[in-house]
């Protein structure tokens, strides 16, 4: 099993053509460093995270997501709820404001707003996320769910998930598949074959 895993990892990393979420020496699946993103992309803030035990954490945002240290999602809490957390266990609490959250899907050269019937992005959001999308491409992310908290002057990146599930984009499924296939199938631009590193974000509608 380990040998098959390693062979698949190597094949994806070394294949000369386009690859969705290309593997690298850092892992089979790209893992985004949010702090590195904040450092390299203007007007981006990291999520508000508190690490602690079963005691109620400070509410810097209206809601908190609860994860185990290994990333496993356990649930959500707010000031009115009291989740059953184990004594002496360590948890990661991520604050967010549900009213300002946007769920975006990066699919190769296209970005979709999952809250919109057709996946269209508002013009202001298009401008705000350009740097984020370009950074993700440098990290080999070509298919992923972006959870962002929006504000007029900045974005807070809550999470980048390289494993979107169909239920999240079912209403625009065909558009997503078309964007991914266009990326994978070789084609020509200005008489030159498209290179994997070339990127002009297409904000889809």
Image (cartoon, rainbow, N blue to C red):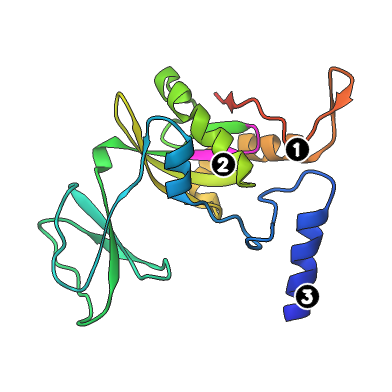
Q: Earlier in the sequence, mark 2 or mark 3?
A: 3
Q: Earlier in the sequence, mark 3 or mark 1?
A: 3
Tag nearer the camera, 3 or 1: 1
**136 or 117: which is nearer to us?**
136
Q: CA distance from mark 2 to mark 3?
A: 28 Å
Q: CA distance from mark 3 to mark 1?
A: 26 Å
The relative height of residue 126 versus residue 3 in the rendered view (above or below) is above
Q: Which residue is mark 1?
A: 196
Principal SS element in the magenta part? strand
Q: Residue furthest front?
A: 39
Q: Residue furthest right?
A: 191
Badge 1 element = loop
Q: Which residue: 62% across, 41% down?
A: 138
**29 or 138: which is nearer to us?**
138
Write down the region rendered in magenta.
104-109
Q: Which mark is residue 4?
A: 3
């Amino acid at each position: 099993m380990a040998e098959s895993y390693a062979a698949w990892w190597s094949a994806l990393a070394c294949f000369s053509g386009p690859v969705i979420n290309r593997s690298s020496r850092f892992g089979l699946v790209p893992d985004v460093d949010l702090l590195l993103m904040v450092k390299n992309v203007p007007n981006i803030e990291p999520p508000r995270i508190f690490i602690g035990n079963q005691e109620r954490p400070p509410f810097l945002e209206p809601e908190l997501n609860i994860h185990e240290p290994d990333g496993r999602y356990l649930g959500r809490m707010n000031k009115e709820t009291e989740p059953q957390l184990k004594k002496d266990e360590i948890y990661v609490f991520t604050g967010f404001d549900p009213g300002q959250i946007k769920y975006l899907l990066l699919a190769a050269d296209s970005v979709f707003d999952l809250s919109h019937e057709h996946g269209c992005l508002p013009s202001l959001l298009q401008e705000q996320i350009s740097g984020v999308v370009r950074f993700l491409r440098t990290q080999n992310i070509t298919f992923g769910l972006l959870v962002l908290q929006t504000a007029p002057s900045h974005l807070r990146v809550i999470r980048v998930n390289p494993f979107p599930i169909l239920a999240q984009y079912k209403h625009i499924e065909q558009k997503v598949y078309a964007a991914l296939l266009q990326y994978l199938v070789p084609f020509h631009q200005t008489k030159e074959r498209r290179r994997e590193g070339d990127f002009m974000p297409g904000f889809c509608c």
